[in-house]
Image: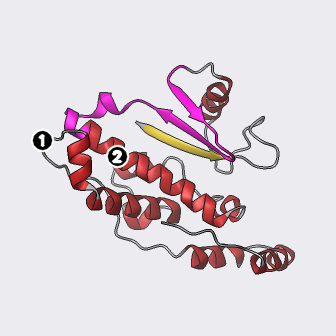
Amino acid sequence: MYVFIFIKDDDGFQDVPLHIKVTSSFHSKIKQTIEGSYSEAFCLYPENVIFLIKERLLKHSSCVNEFYANIAFLLSHELRHFQQSYFLEDRIFIMLQDYNPDYVTELLKGQIDCDGLHWSEQDAYSYSLWFVTKHREAITKIFQLEDWLFLFGCHIEIDYEKEWKRYKRKLTFVDQVIWTIKDLFWKRNMLI
């Protein structure tokens, strides 16, 4: 199962103005999903997020245990991205400009590891590993798993405010001033 999240801007989802670079084919699938004409995926968009979920995990899982363990891991991973956008608000658009949507291919080929991932993925993989480890007993019971699997994860703690400051320094002077003023009124929604 692949889960993709896209965040709505002021124009909504009409043109699906992605804040990351994707292939035209992938962009087309997103638009078709929103329109309800792409049968391999579905989307939910509460407030400002599209969850594009593709069921491919069954083909790539060697056993039922792996499939169900990955569901818990991947959903917690994608929900962490939602938490990132909730905390960072509009800052997330700036902070995703250098995101590489093809990182999974690079991971599988051994071209990158946890340290080479975008900060948002480092955080999401770290959170997912923590989540499934903490709730291992419940996950095992809910899905009736016979044994536990090793799941890919990172052990990298991400400080969102520190990351934001790093990105903000790269903005033009005028944008830095605007965002500094906005930051004075930033309510910093709580993360779990």
User: The disc labelled 2 sits on which kind of residue?
Assistant: Ala
Residue that badge 2 annotates: 72
Check disc 1 and give the amino acid type: Glu
Question: Position of 190 compared to 157: left or right?
Answer: right
6 vs 60, left or right, is: right
Residue 67 is situated, as x and y percent measured from the top left of the image, at 28, 36
Does residue 117 show up magenta in the picture? Answer: no
Q: Residue at x 63, y 77 (%)?
A: 166
Residues under labels 1 and 2: Cα distance? 15 Å
Circles 1 and 2: CB distance less than 8 Å? Answer: no
Q: Is residue 67 visible?
A: yes
**Residue 100: % across, % down:** 55, 53
Q: Is residue 20 above or below residue 190?
A: above
Q: Secondary structure at mark 1?
A: loop
Judged from this view, the residue extending furthest toward the right is: 174
Q: Which of the 4 image quarters holds residue 29?
A: top right
Assess disc 2: are there few (<14), some (14-19) or many (≥20) residues with their C-alpha within 10 Å of its C-alpha: some
Q: Is residue 40 above or below residue 23?
A: above
Between 186 and 105, the residue placed more toward the observer is 186
Residue 59, given in percent of the width and then of the height, sits at 31, 27
- Compared with 21, 16 (above or below) is above
Q: Position of residue 74 (x, y in %)?
A: 39, 46
Mark 2 residue element: helix
Q: Earlier in the sequence, mark 1 or mark 2?
A: 2
For mark 1, what is the residue? Answer: 146
The magenta stretch is 39-66
Let me know if residue 53 is in the magenta part. Answer: yes
